[in-house]
Each structure stands twice: as C-alpha cells, then as structure tokens.
Image (cartoon, helix red, strand yellow):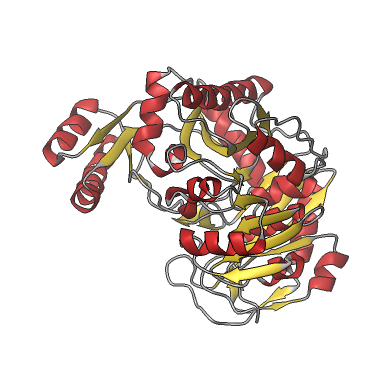
Amino acid sequence: MRVLLVGAGGRESAIAEALSKDSELYVVAKHLNPGIRRVAYEYGLAKETDVQKVLDLALKWGIEIAFIGPETPLEKGIVDTLEENGIPTVGPSKEAAQLETNKAFARALMEKHEIPGRKLFKVFDDIAEMKSWINDFGKPVVVKPLGLTGGKGVKVVGYQLKDNEEAKEYAKALIEKDGRVLVEERTDGVEFTFQVFTDGKKVIPMPLAQDYPHAYEGDVGPITGGMGSYSCENHLLPFVSKEDYEKAFETLKKTIDAMRKEGIPYKGILYGQFMLAKDEPKIIEFNARFGDPEAMNVLPILKTSLLEIAEGIVDGALKKAEFEKKATVVKYVAPKGYPTDPIKGVNVEISEDKIREEGAKVYYASIDENFRMLGSRALAVVGIANSLEEAERIASAGIKHVRGEIFYRADVGTKESVEKRVRIMNEIRGE
C-alpha cells in the first residue's frame, strides 16, 4: 500500500519506521531527514503547511492512505483537503483539531459535557476585566495563548498570590497581540502523557509516558518541546495508580464522545497532557497528534501493525493496538544554546553502529542529510529494555557516541529523577 507521511521530526521518524515495515512509504516535509529518507520510497520537499503542494504530490504518487505527523498542517485543514480528494487520512479534521489549536474550544467542550479532569478557566478580550477577575479569584493562575505555541507559550508564574502581577502583565501582552487570552487556575502536581488511538468511537490506550520539558537537568531552565521521556514496562508510571489511570482514560473517552455528540467526530491520535493533582488527573492540554518525544516511547514497542491501526482509524473499524511489556527511555540531543540561542548549520558526529551495539536506537529530527543541526532538537537516542533502569542505561550508553557542539539531559529517566517525581506526588497527597 502507498502511504504518505507528512513531517520529518523525531516523532515522524518513529512513525516512518513503523509504517515502512509493511507499506511503500512516501514522505513530504520541509527538510530532508536522513533517517526517514532511508525508509522512504519517494521524498518530496515542501512546507508541511503548504496543503496544495502536499495534495499535488499525493495525487501524483497515487497515495492510498495518509498519516499526518505535526500539528501545524492539521490547523491548516490538510486532512479535510486530502479526504475531499479521495485520500483517507489519519488525523482530525480542521474543526476537530481545535482540541489542540484552540484552547478555549477545548475548555468549553469539557465544561459543557461535564468531562472529568477539567479546570476552572475564563477567556478574556478585555484587559481591565481580566485584571479584575484575577484579583477576585484570589489564587495563583496560569496564563495561556489560545492557539499553537509549540509547547512553549504557557506562563506559570509561581506558587504565591503576589506572582499574579506577572501573570496579569503576560495576559495583557497576549490580549494586545492576539485579541484574547486564556486564564485558568493553577494546579500543582506531576505531569504525565496519555496517548490514545481512536476512530471516533473506539478508543485504544497507549502506554503512559512522562516528558522532561525543561531544558536543563534538575527540571530547570526554559520550557522546550521536550528533552526526553520515559515509559515503564507495566505501561503505567511509578506515581500513577491504577485508579488515576482509569480516571485519565475516562477523560479521554468522554472527550471523544463529546466531539461525536457535537457533530465533530475526532479520529487519529489524541494526546492528553495531564497534571496528576491532589484529587484527580487534570487536563493541562490536548494535542491532536503523537507527542514528540513520546511517539518514540510507544511506537518502537508497538506489536500491532501501525498500517493496520491506520486503516482501522480511517475505516471507523479500529480493532486493537498491542504493546510489548518493555520500558523505554528517550534522550534528545540538541545544539548548544538551545532553546534560546541555538547554533545552526554545525555538523554532529554520530556513530550509528556503536549506538546499535549498545542496544540503543537513534531517530533523527532537526538535522539535514549532511548531518548539520538545523537549530532545534537534532536527534534522539532510545533505550528499550525489561526495566526502566536498564532502558536508561542503554540510552545513556548510546548517546555517548554522539559528538559535537551539543547538549542533552543526562537525568532523563534516571532512578533519581523518577524518585523525585514520586516524592513530589506523595507530598501533595500527604502520603
């Protein structure tokens, strides 16, 4: 089967590997990813948001099914365009993708359908009203732009009420820039990622993962798209109980149900970014696609054919998605200076054979065919094993065979960093 993949980041590298096992893979992306190029039958260069160019290539190649990797083409309505031209596509329509692209839409949907895990929120277009509401609210708040931010636009200013002055200034700037802003209650806890496959009715869970969004070790520094992530062999996380898991899964299932009731059926991958709070898991945000890096946790241990899952999604006949009982650790390598002032165009030396000898996998992301870093997270090294400790050891051994003007978080998936998260959760819940 001729399958089109749109995108060429680390997430798409994992998707490409999985799809190429039993299909003829065609790719459209804005840069030539060396890892994806190896498994692709044809590779077209175009912006992922240039929907017409993507369509032209898809029709030229005789594509039978498409798979959208990143969120930006979803916002442009790429799924609608491809399907109107007879190409069934894994991903939500432009309207359904609002779960990610319009935070006010997502919050209002949860409120209307009384979906568990929702937070108190309000959308403002008036600066004076916003300031008055925050003053009256009397508790710390979180400020968010309504649209896509690449995981970097949220302002969590602090734990204390006095920090709300900074929140008001940020909210004011966003109203002046975008016209509207989302302000919601601050929730303290530990974040985790819950991804599911859905055909609009049936919802199949993937193993939980936890991302490390801060740039530097010890969970400090600017927020990035994610410096790494881990998942456990039991598909839970050390601080997530079975009861918490079921509550989070219920939130995702009820969200899919609500979309169907609204006449906006949602199909593809739904990603719930949860904050495990004192009382229950709360939705921080939805993503309308695989996480990056979290796709690299779940897809390498997927036992079911991803093509079979994709066909089930587009046919409305999703059956199963089985995963190996393995732990995974993803460590991203970024250019020095990332994310604030990354070096670009500098070569990185990668000993792939030695990485594989360590038992690790490598996925390429923001790097070109000459192995020059393009400014964002360049590549990821993944360890897979029967235990988290062993998976982390493998990833750490593999990443030592990447050299250049780079940095990475050595603490991703380590016993110490995971224990820190368990400790935080125990303190919040008084356990």
Residue that lies at the very extreme toward the right in this rendered image: 357
Vertical comparison of 90 with 362: above or below: above
Q: Residue at x 70, y 66 (%)?
A: 36
**410 and 342: which is toward the camera:** 342
Picture quadrant where residue 406 is located: bottom right
Q: Is residue 186 left or right of residue 423?
A: left
Q: Position of residue 332 (x, y in %)?
A: 63, 61
Q: Nearer the viewer, residue 307 or 340?
A: 307
Q: Residue at x 25, y 47 (%)?
A: 166
Q: Report which quarter residue 408 is drawn in.
A: bottom right
* Residue at 71% over, 40% down: 311
Residue 382 can be seen in this image: yes
Q: How many marks are shown on the rendered structure? A: 0
Residue lying at the far top of the rendered structure: 114
Viewer can see residue 186:
no
Q: Quadrant of the C terminus?
A: top right
Query: Residue 394, position in %: x, y?
Result: 80, 57
Picture quarter containing residue 350? Answer: bottom right
Q: Is residue 177 left or right of residue 199?
A: left
Q: Residue furthest left?
A: 128
| Residue 135 pos. (x, y %) | 19, 31
* Residue 163 or residue 384, whichever sits in front: 384
Left or right for 70, reference 21: left
Horizontally, residue 290 falls left or right of residue 186, namely right
Q: Residue at image x 82%, y 38%? A: 325
Residue 1 placement (x, y as % from top left): 76, 53
